[in-house]
Image (spheres, helix red, strand yellow):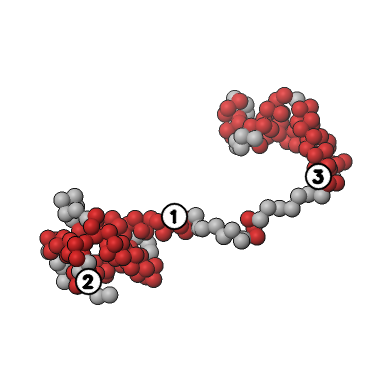
């Protein structure tokens, strides 16, 4: 894709309208020749690699062909309209990369097999013992444990929230863990 000579903005608007009204392939070829290299450079400046930029240019040009009737020269210039389409395609690509399509046949998405009955009973008993062990902790230890693990707060946040020295928070949490460990060890 080599850069073509610049075209007057009114002529560009006329070309888009020719594509919209008559599906004019020659007008589209002129638009393509003018914008394709510029769009590729623009998309590469936005961080797209060469191949990805070329694919996005193809998508943008196809959109121009299909949506040319939606262009209104009173609303914006052709360049603004086309570069907005290109920017939006780039954003769509980034979103797809961050949130890829899920493969319904992916084994990681299959539900896990239910636990064997004896395992489920053991887990339920351990859960019951742990809940009771937390209830049996001194209030100041149980409170800090809930803040740290149920609310996900850091030791520093807990210290600030409870107006306690950081060392006190750490000591109380360590004491709570030791008590819970002693209670849970026989159940391993």
Could you say where residue 172 lies in the image, as x and y percent from the top left? 71, 31
Q: Nearer the viewer, mark 3 or mark 1?
A: 3
29 shown above or below 100? below
Label 2 residue SS: helix
Residue drawn at x 83%, y 38% is 125
Residue drawn at x 44%, y 55% is 95
Is residue 79 visible from the viewing direction of this image? Answer: no
Residue drawn at x 19%, y 62% is 21
Q: Which mark is residue 95?
A: 1
126 shown above or below 46? above
Q: CA distance from mark 2 to mark 3?
A: 68 Å
Is residue 114 visible from the viewing direction of this image? Answer: yes
Residue position for label 3: 120
Image side of residue 181 versus residue 149, left or right: right
Q: Which mark is residue 136?
A: none
Name the quadrant containing residue 135. top right
- In this view, the residue in front, 161 or 1, is 1
Label 3 residue SS: helix
Name the quadrant containing residue 143. top right
Could you say where residue 157 lies in the image, as x and y percent from the top left? 57, 33
Label 1 residue SS: helix
Could you say where residue 17 lies in the image, as x and y percent from the top left? 17, 61
Residue position for label 2: 25
């Amino acid at each position: 894709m080599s850069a073509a000579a610049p075209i007057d903005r009114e002529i560009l608007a006329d070309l888009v309208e020719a594509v919209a009204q008559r599906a004019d392939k020659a007008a589209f070829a002129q638009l393509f020749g003018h914008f394709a290299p510029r769009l590729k450079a623009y998309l590469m400046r936005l961080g797209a690699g060469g191949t990805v930029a070329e694919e996005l240019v193809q998508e943008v040009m196809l959109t121009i062909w299909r949506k040319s009737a939606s262009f209104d020269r009173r609303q914006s210039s052709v360049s603004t309209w086309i570069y907005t389409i290109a920017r939006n395609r780039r954003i769509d690509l980034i979103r797809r990369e961050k949130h890829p399509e899920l493969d319904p046949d992916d084994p990681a998405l299959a539900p896990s097999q239910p636990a064997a009955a004896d395992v489920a009973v053991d887990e339920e008993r351990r859960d019951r013992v742990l809940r009771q062990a937390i209830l049996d902790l001194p209030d100041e230890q149980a409170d800090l444990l809930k803040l740290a693990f149920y609310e996900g707060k850091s030791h520093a946040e807990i210290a600030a929230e409870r107006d306690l020295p950081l060392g006190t928070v750490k000591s109380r949490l360590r004491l709570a863990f030791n008590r819970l460990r002693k209670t849970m060890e026989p159940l391993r």
